[in-house]
Amino acid sequence: MIEDVRGAFCQLHTAGTFVLPNPWDVPSARLLEHLGFPALATTSSGFAATLGRADQHVTRDELVAHVAALTAAVRVPVSVDAERGYAEDPAGVAETVRMLADAGASGVSIEDYDPGSGGIAPVEVAAERIAAAASVCDSYGIVLTGRAENPLYGIGDLGDTIARLTAYRDAGASCVYAPGLTDLADIARVVGEVGVAVNVLALRNGPTVPQLADVGVRRVSTGGSLAWAAYGALVDAAAELRDSGTSTYLDRALPRPLRDAALD
């Protein structure tokens, strides 16, 4: 039952550290579930890529359909990258979260970057949107993550980032996330000051999962990186075929048992 799945996702946020990988379609979700990950999350950039679009160019209805397909395909909880809520006002954010919950989501994240203005929203505006999302998440028993996008957009003021995360916590977020942090001391400071579960984005030159666990990070996600790694493997294989006419890339092809797991 969906209540059990959502309860399991909430429980993951109470102790320890877990990895929350981000599939971009049904086969990748099934593969990650088969590999034993306890929960999954969508990726806005990875999903947009499947439609041939850049990040932040997916409609709300397309996202809801995507979430419904993923939650129907796997048995583990699925959290949703809902960008800024696909709405211009808090009431619209609440409606988006309700639609995602009805599609089977066990978690939702709302960020404070506004692509319309090309900047980070004022903290009081962003917190109001988080509060609207929280009112729906609480009624469905799903995890709300408040995202401060400062690090992704070149704003290195850690104090402001922590103040934003704290405001989102106070507005009802039970998990907070500032994607792009790489300094372990900065991450430890976030964990120590916000007082709720913290998500960190796994990055090539960032701390390892064990290092993040040592400073109390609760959740480690991958964003669009797995999707782009997969597309990178495709380009490498196709370039070999084009340039040398060989097919050694098949040595790295997915074994049939895993293919069956993805497509069954």
Image (cartoon, grey):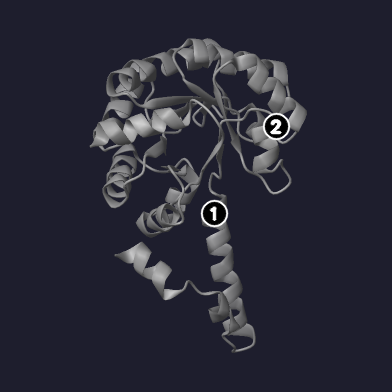
- Looking at the picture, how far across and down is residue 4, in whole percent? 29, 33
Q: Nearer the viewer, residue 209 or 85?
A: 209
Q: Nearer the viewer, residue 166 or 241?
A: 166
Residue 227 vertical placement versus 179 (above, below): below
Disc 1 marks which amino acid?
Answer: Leu
- Looking at the picture, how far across and down is residue 16, in whole percent? 56, 32
Q: Pointer 1: residues within 10 angstroms few (<14), some, or many (20+)?
A: some
Q: Residue at x 58, y 25 (%)?
A: 148
Q: Which mark is residue 154?
A: 2
Q: Nearer the viewer, residue 158 or 209?
A: 209
Q: Residue at x 39, y 22 (%)?
A: 88
Q: Give the quadrant of residue 142.
A: top left
Q: Which mark is residue 135?
A: none
In screen coordinates, is 217 left or right of 87?
right
- Looking at the picture, how far across and down is residue 174, in whole percent? 47, 20
Which residue bears the numbered disc 1? 226
Q: Quadrant of the C terminus?
A: bottom left
Disc 2 marks which amino acid?
Answer: Gly
Q: Residue at x 26, y 48 (%)?
A: 72
Asked whether residue 58 appears in the rendered view, the answer is yes
Q: CA distance from mark 1 to mark 2?
A: 23 Å
- Looking at the picture, how far across and down is residue 175, in whole percent? 50, 24
Q: Give the quadrant of residue 83.
A: top left
Q: Pointer 2: residues within 10 angstroms few (<14), some, or many (20+)?
A: few
In screen coordinates, is 233 left or right of 156?
left
Please identify the residue farthest to the bottom as the structure is shown. 245
